[in-house]
Amino acid sequence: MCYKNLFSIILITILTFSSCNKVKNVNEQPNIVWITSEDNSKHYMKLFDENGVKTPHIEKLAENGIVFTRAFSNAPVCSAARSTLISGCYGPRIASHYHRKSKLVPMPKELEMFPAYLRKAGYYTTNKHKEDYNIIKSDSVWDESSKQASWRNRAENQPFFHVFNIMTTHESRLHFSKKRMKSKSTITNKDSVFIQPNHPITETFKYTNAYYRDKIVEMDNEVGEVISQLKEDGLLKNTFVFYFGDHGGVLPGSKGYLTETGLHVPLVVSIPEKYKHLVNEKSGSTTNGFVSFIDFGATVLNIAGIKIPKEIDGKPFLGKNVDFKEFTSRDETYSYSDRLDEKYDMVRSLRKGKYKYVRNYQPFNFDGLMNNYRYRQLAYKEWSTLNNDHKLNKVQTSFFEVKQPEFLYNVEDDPFETTNLATNPKFLETLTQMREKLTTWVKDMPDLSFFPEHYLIQHAFNNPVEFGQQHKNEIQNYIDIANLMLLDFELAKSTIKKSLNSNDPWERYWALIVCSSFGESAIELTPIIKQISILDTELVNKVRAAEFLGIVKAKNPSEIMLKALYETNDEIEALLILNSIVLMKDGFSKYSFSIELEKIAVNVSGNKVVKQRLSYLKVL
């Protein structure tokens, strides 16, 4: 009996200690809140830029934390940016980088969306409410993701991770009418507001700039409401609060483009008093260390004391074992942009310190090419009209012109990227170094976009990372072919010819793109390319060949392109073909196309994004 009582006492003591220890661990874990505003680059907030408006609530948040002056989205548009945030992975490595998604991709093997690790560690995870992932989401990610999601629904003493999304500054808010412009004035003075140098100074652009800044002030008030709720619940003392934009802003040439205004986001992190030991930096400080969206998930896990999976591409910038001195020396960020709704392009960039290197892999796809959602904005429409009427200066008209394969900017001296230094001999060493770094990056991932999107969907989307590793040598070869456009044509010619005659269709694909990039310099290859336009086994290669022939005015491309459009049963392949058709219609010799809707496969013409192209081409 005595032994039995002793055993009971020991058992109760063990259970009590275990229970107390569990509660203690829970209470020691900090809460973490993300407040994310849609479509905001840092350029329009006084906290970051002299041309911005005051945002008192965000500025107040900064007093108790750190202002990050070099924070970047890795992609300039919602779904691609948010897929990077939630996965901690570079989009071109896992095929989450096309906007909008045509098909969801799985997370890399052995990796989950990072909130799942928080949840396993006892956190209550909530998202209010936008997700917009291009990745398959498991049930283990959120306790709740809805308009009603709140930390207030958690168990007592349970730590939480909460995401609060603010739509107030979203691009759609700038889809106002001329009637509104005339009838409703802005709070921000439109006659004194800053207009960036690549934009025309017109009443439309003045109003758009002022109205956008009004929405930023409105957004700041919503940030204040979230902070008030945390304060009301007595949570600020043990809650990290992140405020950041989900990518760059929405003035023309920002969202969707690898400009600083499309990528450089505001970031403020408030550090709670209880957890200042996790951050070796004083409150109210500012840092120039570079952070990217791939780092955010790793940082949250590190703050929570959770092991960071090795499959995540990013590294933490706050929490235990982060040397803040080392962090402040970080000076690089990589970015990517591919299909944006119905508009195709392929651009990669590297910012290192004050220099920005941009690699345009398809430079003939000029930035101003029709993109339905963008052109709902009056400022976009007016910009295009003024260009067509030849009323823009050289800087302002560059948006509508064929690009160089490489751009190099000093973004500290030239924040709106108006002067390309890539052809300046003084910067050859910098150009070469950054070109090599970016080439190494796309090869090491490897970058899946060196296969056309429709091919990836058919062959890679079940396991994109594994596909990339299996085809790494081929991808690296395609990258080398693509880089031939950086050489003098005479030096590149023999390799281009060899690639045009390759048995690998995607070698031919990239050789054709290189020829289109050279334009008339490659005109002697016209006979080979004419043969490809007729005999190639891939419809998109016939179209790429016709594209070159149209660019150099060797042949009207319409017949070949329309035949390919009528033959394809793949909606995404059709979208790529239609991109070339719009390019030929609007950009090169204004070729005309008479599309017969009944000849297009029903599943193709019924695709939502294809419809946007067909509507623009006056087929629907």
Image: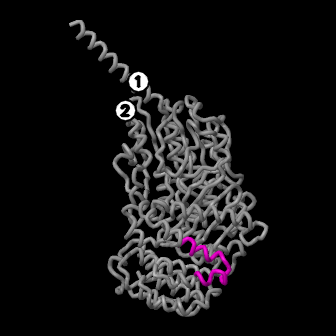
Is residue 417 toward the left or the right of residue 371 in the image? right
- Which colour style is shown? one colour
Q: Which residues are magenta?
A: 478-495
Q: Which residue extends farthest top?
A: 2
Q: Secondary structure at mark 1?
A: helix
Q: Which residue extends farthest right?
A: 426
Q: Quadrant of residue 572?
A: bottom left
Looking at the image, which is closer to me, 12 or 373? 12
Is 481 included in the stretch rendered in magenta?
Answer: yes
Q: Secondary structure at mark 2?
A: loop
* Above or below, 471 relative to 556: above
Q: Which mark is residue 185?
A: none
Disc nearer the start of the sequence (2/1): 1
* Above or below, 160 relative to 560: above
- Which quadrant is the C terminus positioned in? bottom left
Residue 605, position in %: x, y?
37, 78
Rate crowding at label 2 as few (under 14), some (14 to 19) or many (20 or more) other CA atoms within 10 Å.
few
Is residue 570 toward the left or the right of residue 267 in the image? left
Residue 250, position in %: x, y?
57, 61
Q: Which residue has dot 1 on it? A: 21
The three-letter amino acid code for the residue at tag 2 is Ala
**Which residue is located at x 41 percent, y 37 percent?**
123
- Which quadrant is the N terminus positioned in? top left
Q: Which residue has dot 2 on it? A: 155
Q: Quadrant of residue 380?
A: bottom right
Residue 231, position in %: x, y?
52, 33
Looking at the image, which is closer to me, 398 or 73? 73
The three-letter amino acid code for the residue at tag 1 is Asn
Mark whose residue sits in front, 2 or 1: 1
**Which residue is located at x 56 percent, y 82 percent?**
586
State whether residue 368 appears in this view. no
Is 550 included in the stretch rendered in magenta?
Answer: no
